[in-house]
Image (cartoon, helix red, strand yellow):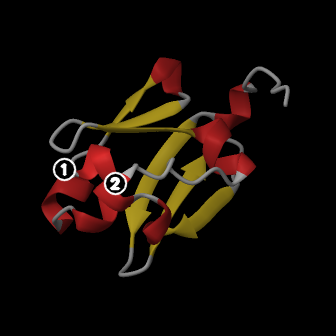
């Protein structure tokens, strides 16, 4: 699969959560909402940890320092959930 470089309008403008979803507002006015279950670290985080996010990657990514989670706007737009951890990695 090939990916195109991010476009200026795909920069992250805001991030918010409800009980079941993560919503990311982009600079071009789009909002992408995905199931929180796609990102187990965010699902298991406290509301305060979720609220502590930073824009990274030149504006095209989101970083949560307390839980060491990083997401890209491009990955969210492509509908890419976090990779599943193997049983050995969970131990």
Q: Is residue 77 above or below residue 37?
A: above
Residue under the point 77% across and 20% down: 5
Q: Where residue 30 appears, x then y in whole percent?
A: 70, 55
Residue under the point 51% across and 26% down: 59
Cα distance between the residues tagged 2 and 1: 7 Å
Quadrant for the N terminus in the image: top right
Q: Where residue 24 appears, x then y in whole percent?
A: 53, 55
Quarter of the view holding residue 49: bottom left
Front residue of this view, candidates 34 and 56:
34
Front residue of this view, candidates 62 and 43:
43
User: Alpha-carbon neighbours of circle 2 within 10 Å: few (<14), some, or many (≥20)?
Assistant: few
In the image: residue 37, left or right of residue 5: left
- Marks 2 and 1: CB-CB under 8 Å? yes
Q: How many marks?
A: 2
Q: Is residue 15 above or below residue 22?
A: above
Q: Is residue 72 above or below residue 19?
A: above
Q: Which residue is mark 1?
A: 91
Q: Which residue is mark 2?
A: 87
In the image: residue 46, left or right of residue 74: left
Query: What SS does tag 2 mark?
Result: helix
């Amino acid at each position: 699969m090939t990916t195109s470089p991010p476009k200026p309008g795909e920069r992250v403008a805001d991030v918010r959560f409800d009980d079941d979803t993560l919503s990311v507002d982009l600079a071009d006015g789009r909002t992408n909402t995905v199931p929180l279950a796609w990102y187990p670290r965010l699902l298991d985080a406290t509301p305060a940890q979720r609220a502590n996010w930073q824009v990274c990657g030149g504006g095209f990514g989101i970083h949560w320092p307390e839980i060491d989670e990083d997401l890209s706007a491009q990955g969210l737009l492509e509908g890419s959930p976090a990779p599943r951890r193997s049983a050995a990695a969970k131990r």
